[in-house]
């Protein structure tokens, strides 16, 4: 079970969180003309990365905040966590 | 009572307390502190079972977790449990155990014929033979294998034992209470660190219980006792025996199974049988020690052949002689320690040492005691079927290839020592890439992966002095980092005998003309010849060899077999062992009861049960409940001898003719507040929300980004910046997360807050032509006329002094309202509605009638919004705005979603107006068409229409728009039904919405 540092609550076990997918995907802005390819990339197409991955988790049984977690998909090492509005450098 | 093999003045058992037990129906005696294994051996019982494949007689090989085959079926307090190691099961009064793997009995076993048919059952036998002919598998092969194989029988009864889960956090978790575990625990505890020390056996001390050493001028055993006693008094230390850390998971989470009650005749009241600990540790110290390695020779599985360390443990801990004419077969000094213990108790062992001329303090001691030692000697084969009677021994040449001077000598046990294998399972599970240590012919942990460090014998360090020094240091330094205390500890001086180098010899060659079975893996009956076959047939990867031969599989996980298997592969393949590599160690290290893993989450405890505030009323009024997610909802209210069908028909009919009331508390409710609330709704719902006035409700549909309908419900504008959203019962949690996702990540600029209010409100739906009359009586001061409270209107009212919210919404095809009050007043509201409604012939209705009413009016619910349908499929395209953008809108342009013959909801009526159509039935054009019959759609929901008094169903049908009036067949192979049907509109009742607006 992963041990995730919620930037709002501190270290908590994985079972308090739910997974939310790739955090680097940006939703096209509303009312913008979007090509099929662009929309498919947003809705469906994901890289199955081995290694460092920025992903979303929601602290569902805690503060209910969505957070970003930088995690290695192969080793499960978690490097850093960020608040939803924090820029990831 | 005499125990022929029990000696006086030795062992840690309590001779004051005699215990009786039964094995295979026969009664024996042992003492408190015995294991089942030691008690049987004290009684001279060596035959405990039959082997897995060849059904050869099997005895005891180890004395603890290392035991590969002394597995029994245990009977305790009216329950039975398979897969119990006799070497780990502590004796209690009245214990009963039986052999497994044998039929009809352990002494006469039919399966043993496998052993004498030489061609039978080599590696891959099951794969090759039982595949053909196919029809034989179910009738002959499988029943035979099932009867003949297996490690016991799982009970089919309900398990009455209780199991607990516990979550714990600590600074240092220490696995193993041998010298290294004790030293590091003590040092860390003195620095004030929070320490958990876990020992899988009943007694603490590990190797110190049996080794002849001195620490700080005490015996090793006394020193261990002193340390444990002190640790137990320290508030920052948890010391646990009978507790096996079996898994090392991510981020230093380890799981430990504590046997709380297995050593007692019955579990004490309020105690669990086992407790599963989830431990998150800052630092993990693996002090799991090492397991002695067998030497491979002919018939090395005969009862009476065992590890020399096990023989020593039976003697030193239990006062039991495993034989009176022992033969010790060793390639290192450990065998001598066992021989010396025998000699001290008046038994004359013979030592066969594969080395030519070894010299050490231990060997000198053995010589001084007059022990018969034969150098460059090996055991060629054990003789005797159910018990060792003698052994063929031989001189072996310097290159270890040629046997000479073969002779037979009498012995009643053979104690084998092939040196030591560090127990690296936990380190390996943590992700540590292990490395091969040439000096000890074994793998040891390499670079730490998580916060783990391996110490002592588990790390390949076999000197006590070095183990204590490194362990005190590790405990002290790791705890210092955490607590910033640095309390110095004097490291005690150690007296131990120096040993000489071991011999890398591991397998005795076969003498000419002999074909003895030489076993590598005792639990799975894998012999040298099996691995040879696997390699000959082209299996190269050690992982493949493992699967093909079953070497190192099952519950044993190769504890004693692993390295010898690798040695063999490396020899045949002409590779060095590290190039062959070992198979992956996976948790659990030892078998864990399913009950312990499940814990308390059984039956009703497997999930929480949510009840509405009106639950007690429903119960009192004969409600029959149904699980709706985690909620309990009334399915129907039983009157007299009614069944579900009759009751739900009555309830639905009463809604259509009079008025009914239904508990709708379970609907998800979300408060949406803030200046941008309308904007948020406008983006998440497909329809327009910016112009909804205060005091009005609107029905909305929300999509996922892929265009699939996620949920539907009504949202009401309570005040300027305050909306009350409802969701379906099932989707309530998902919808809240969905809103939070967009508010926090996508549109953080929106000034809106959302919070679940599901539990804050109790809800009652009042539906039927007389519902307005009833409502007027409930709220005499409010104008609930069609003008005062029109369809989709909202008002607040005073329900006999209780503030209520009144919504005019309908999902039944009738004039209907929903009344909400704060949860604590829910029951009050309900009773008032029933009381006042009496004159209107009110009846409560359950989910079955609710479902009937919504199906009849064609209102979609979970069975249509099944994660595969878009708004058009549900005839909801009228709610999809063409003007504004919203979540999922772009996906609705996908070609499949706009196809002319797109699936769409329809109504279905059987032609005979009698036969109910099973939900899930497929709709097909031709009921006689060859399979696979092309499916045009499926029945999503069925009911008995109370309006028309015939069955009515909803279906999602291909090109549904153009199918109205068509005749099709509904086929349910599951129910074996073919029903001719007609396709009609999905709006069977009130198609124009006249009633709901009346
Ligand atoms: Zn949090």
Image (cartoon, helix red, strand yellow):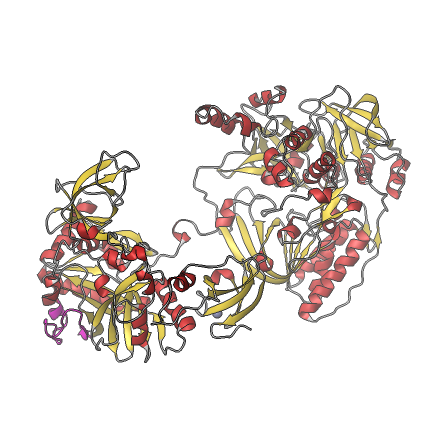
B714, above or below B493, in the image:
below
Q: Identify which residue, A37 or B727, lies in the foreground.
A: A37
Is residue B959 in view from this perspective? Answer: yes
Give the dominant element type of the magenta stretch: helix, strand or loop: loop
- Residue B663, image x, y percentages: 23, 60
Quadrant of the rendered image containing residue B678: bottom left
Quadrant of the rendered image containing residue B484: bottom right
- Residue B458, image x, y percentages: 72, 50
Q: Residue at x 23, y 33 (%)?
A: B928
Q: Identify which residue, B661 or B553, lies in the foreground.
A: B553
- Residue B473, image x, y percentages: 76, 62
Image quadrant containing the C terminus of chain B = bottom left
Q: Identify which residue, B320 or B840, lies in the foreground.
A: B840
A8, above or below B302, in the image:
below
Please give the range of residues in magenta. B775-801
B899, above or below B58, in the image:
below
- Residue B32, image x, y percentages: 64, 41
Q: Identify which residue, A1 or A78, lies in the foreground.
A: A78
Residue B274 falls left or right of residue B900: right
Residue B653 falls left or right of residue B551: left
Image quadrant containing the N terminus of chain B = top right
């Amino acid at each position: 079970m992963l041990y995730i540092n919620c930037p709002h609550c501190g270290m908590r076990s994985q079972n308090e969180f739910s997974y939310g997918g790739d955090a680097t995907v940006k939703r096209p802005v509303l009312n913008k003309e979007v090509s099929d390819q662009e929309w498919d990339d947003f809705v469906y197409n994901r890289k199955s990365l081995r290694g460092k991955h920025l992903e979303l988790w929601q602290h569902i049984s805690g503060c209910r905040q969505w957070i970003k977690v930088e995690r290695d998909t192969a080793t499960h090492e978690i490097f850093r966590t960020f608040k939803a509005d924090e820029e990831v450098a | 009572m005499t125990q022929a093999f029990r000696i006086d003045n030795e062992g840690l058992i309590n001779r004051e307390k005699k215990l009786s037990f039964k094995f295979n129906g026969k009664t024996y005696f042992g003492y408190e502190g015995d294991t089942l294994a030691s008690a049987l051996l004290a009684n001279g019982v060596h035959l405990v079972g039959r082997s897995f494949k060849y059904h050869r007689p099997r005895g005891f090989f180890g004395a603890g977790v290392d035991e590969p085959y002394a597995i029994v079926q245990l009977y305790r307090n009216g329950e039975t449990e398979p897969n119990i190691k006799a070497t780990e099961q502590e004796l209690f009064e009245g214990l009963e155990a039986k052999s497994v793997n044998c039929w009809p009995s352990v002494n006469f076993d039919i399966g043993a014929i496998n052993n004498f048919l030489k061609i039978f059952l080599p590696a891959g036998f099951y794969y090759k033979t039982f595949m053909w002919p196919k029809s034989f598998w179910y009738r002959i092969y499988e029943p035979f294998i099932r009867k003949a194989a297996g490690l016991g029988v799982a009970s089919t009864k309900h398990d009455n034992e209780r199991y607990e889960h516990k979550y714990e956090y600590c600074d240092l978790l220490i696995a193993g209470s041998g010298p290294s575990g004790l030293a590091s625990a003590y040092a860390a505890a003195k620095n004030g660190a929070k320490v958990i020390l876990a020992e899988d056996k009943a007694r603490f001390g590990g190797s110190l219980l049996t080794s002849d050493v001195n620490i700080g001028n005490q015996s090793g055993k006394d020193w261990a006792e002193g340390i444990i006693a002190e640790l137990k008094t320290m508030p920052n230390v948890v010391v646990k025996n009978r507790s096996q850390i079996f898994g090392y998971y991510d981020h230093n989470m380890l799981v430990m199974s504590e046997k709380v009650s297995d050593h007692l005749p019955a579990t004490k009241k309020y105690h669990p049988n086992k407790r599963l600990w989830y431990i998150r540790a800052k630092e993990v110290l693996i002090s799991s020690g090492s397991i002695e390695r067998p030497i491979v020779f002919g018939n090395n599985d005969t009862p009476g052949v065992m590890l020399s360390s096990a023989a020593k443990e039976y003697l030193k801990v239990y006062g039991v002689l495993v034989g009176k004419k022992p033969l010790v077969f060793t390639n290192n000094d450990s065998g001598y320690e066992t021989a010396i213990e025998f000699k001290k108790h008046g038994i004359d062992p013979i030592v066969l040492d594969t080395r030519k001329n070894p010299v050490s303090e231990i060997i000198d001691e053995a010589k001084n005691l007059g022990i018969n030692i034969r150098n460059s000697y090996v055991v060629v084969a054990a003789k005797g079927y159910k018990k060792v009677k003698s052994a063929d021994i031989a001189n072996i040449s310097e290159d270890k290839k040629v046997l000479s001077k073969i002779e037979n000598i009498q012995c009643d046990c053979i104690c084998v020592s092939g040196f030591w294998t560090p127990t690296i399972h936990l380190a390996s599970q943590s992700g540590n890439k292990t490395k091969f240590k040439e000096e000890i012919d074994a793998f040891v942990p390499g670079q730490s992966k998580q916060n783990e460090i391996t110490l002592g014998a588990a790390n390949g360090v076999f000197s006590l002095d070095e183990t204590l020094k490194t362990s005190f240091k590790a405990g002290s330094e790791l705890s210092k980092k955490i607590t910033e205390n640095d309390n110095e500890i004097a490291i005690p001086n150690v007296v131990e005998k120096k040993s000489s180098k071991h011999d890398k010899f591991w397998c005795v060659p076969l003498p000419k003309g002999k074909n003895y079975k030489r076993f590598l893996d005792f639990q799975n009956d894998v012999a040298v010849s099996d691995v040879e076959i696997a390699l000959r047939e082209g299996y190269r990867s050690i992982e493949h060899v493992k699967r093909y031969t079953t070497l190192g599989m099952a519950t044993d996980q190769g504890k004693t077999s692993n390295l010898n298997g690798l040695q063999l592969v490396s020899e045949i393949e002409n590779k060095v062992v590290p190039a062959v590599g070992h198979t992956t160690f996976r948790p659990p290290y030892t078998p864990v009861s399913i009950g312990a893993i499940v814990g308390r989450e059984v039956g009703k405890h497997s999930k929480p049960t949510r009840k509405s505030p009106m639950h007690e009323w429903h119960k009192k009024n004969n409600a029959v409940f149904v699980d709706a997610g985690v909620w309990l909802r009334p399915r129907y209210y039983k009157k007299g001898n009614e069944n579900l069908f009759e009751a739900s028909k009555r309830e639905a009919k009463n809604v259509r003719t009079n008025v009914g009331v239904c508990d709708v508390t379970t609907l998800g409710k979300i408060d949406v507040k803030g200046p941008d609330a309308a904007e948020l709704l406008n983006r998440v719902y497909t329809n327009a929300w910016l112009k909804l006035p205060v005091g009005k409700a609107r029905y909305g549909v929300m999509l996922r980004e892929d265009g699939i309908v996620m949920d539907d419900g009504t949202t009401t504008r309570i005040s300027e910046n305050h909306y009350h959203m409802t969701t379906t019962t099932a989707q309530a949690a998902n919808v809240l997360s969905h809103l939070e996702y967009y508010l926090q990540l996508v549109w953080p600029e929106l000034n809106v807050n959302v919070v679940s209010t599901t539990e804050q409100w109790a809800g009652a739906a009042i539906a039927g032509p007389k519902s307005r009359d009833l409502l007027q009586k409930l709220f005499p001061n409010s104008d609930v006329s069609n003008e005062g409270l029109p369809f989709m209107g909202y008002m607040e009212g005073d329900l006999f002094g209780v503030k209520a919210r009144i919504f005019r919404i309908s999902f039944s095809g009738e004039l209907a309202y929903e009344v909400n009050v704060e949860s604590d007043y829910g029951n009050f509201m309900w009773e008032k509605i029933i009381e006042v409604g009496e004159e209107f012939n009110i009846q409560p209705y359950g989910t079955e009638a609710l479902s009937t009413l919504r199906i009849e009016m064609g209102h979609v619910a979970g069975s249509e919004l099944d994660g595969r349908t878009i708004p058009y499929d549900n005839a909801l395209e009228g709610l999809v705005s063409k003007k504004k953008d919203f979540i999922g809108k772009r996906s609705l342009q996908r070609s499949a979603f706009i196809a002319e013959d797109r699936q769409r909801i329809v109504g279905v009526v059987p032609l005979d107006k009698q036969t109910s159509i099973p939900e899930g039935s497929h709709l097909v054009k031709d009921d006689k068409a060859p399979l696979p019959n092309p499916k045009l759609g499926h029945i999503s929901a069925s009911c008995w229409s109370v309006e028309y008094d015939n069955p009515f169903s909803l279906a999602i049908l291909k090109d549904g728009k153009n199918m109205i009036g068509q005749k099709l067949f509904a086929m349910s192979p599951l129910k074996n039904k073919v029903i001719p049907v007609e396709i009609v509109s999905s709006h069977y009742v009130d198609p124009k919405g006249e009633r709901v607006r009346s």
